[in-house]
Each structure stands twice: as structure tokens, then as C-alpha cells.
Image (spheres, helix red, strand yellow):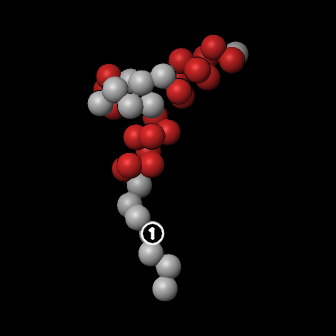
Amino acid sequence: EEWRQQYNQYRPHSSLGYLPPAVFADQARPSLQLA
């Protein structure tokens, strides 16, 4: 199961511009500004 997490969550994906999914999500998430 650990290999599956590594393969799906942490390795760079070509469809995401060779970024890992977590990094891609952080960049895609709009910045939140708290008032």
C-alpha cells in the first residue's frame, strides 16, 4: 500500500507539469486573505 501512495501522491505527474499532486494543488489553490 505504501508504494501506491508514493506512486499516486508524491511522484511527479506529467499531466500536472511534472509536479507532485500536493504541490500542484497548493499552487492551484487561490490565496485566502483573512480580514
Q: Look at label 1 and name its amino acid.
A: Leu
- Left or right: 31, with 3 as reference point: left
- Left or right: 17, with 3 as reference point: left
Q: Residue furthest right?
A: 1
**Residue 27, percent from left and from top:** 38, 49
Label 1: state its secondary structure.
Answer: loop
Residue at figure coordinates x 38%, y 31% from the top left: 19
**Residue 13, percent from left and from top:** 38, 24
Residue at figure coordinates x 33%, y 31% from the top left: 16
Q: How many marks?
A: 1
Residue carrying label 1: 32
Q: Report crowding for label 1: few under 14, some 14 to 19, many 20 or more residues within 10 A (C-alpha).
A: few
Residue 1: image quadrant is: top right
Vertical relation: 20 (above or below) 11: below
Vertical relation: 24 (above or below) 28: above
Residue at figure coordinates x 61%, y 17% from the top left: 4
Q: Residue furthest bottom?
A: 35
- Left or right: 32, with 2 as reference point: left
**Residue 17, percent from left and from top:** 29, 30
Residue 33: image quadrant is: bottom left
- Left or right: 18, with 32 as reference point: left
Vertical relation: 2 (above or below) 22: above
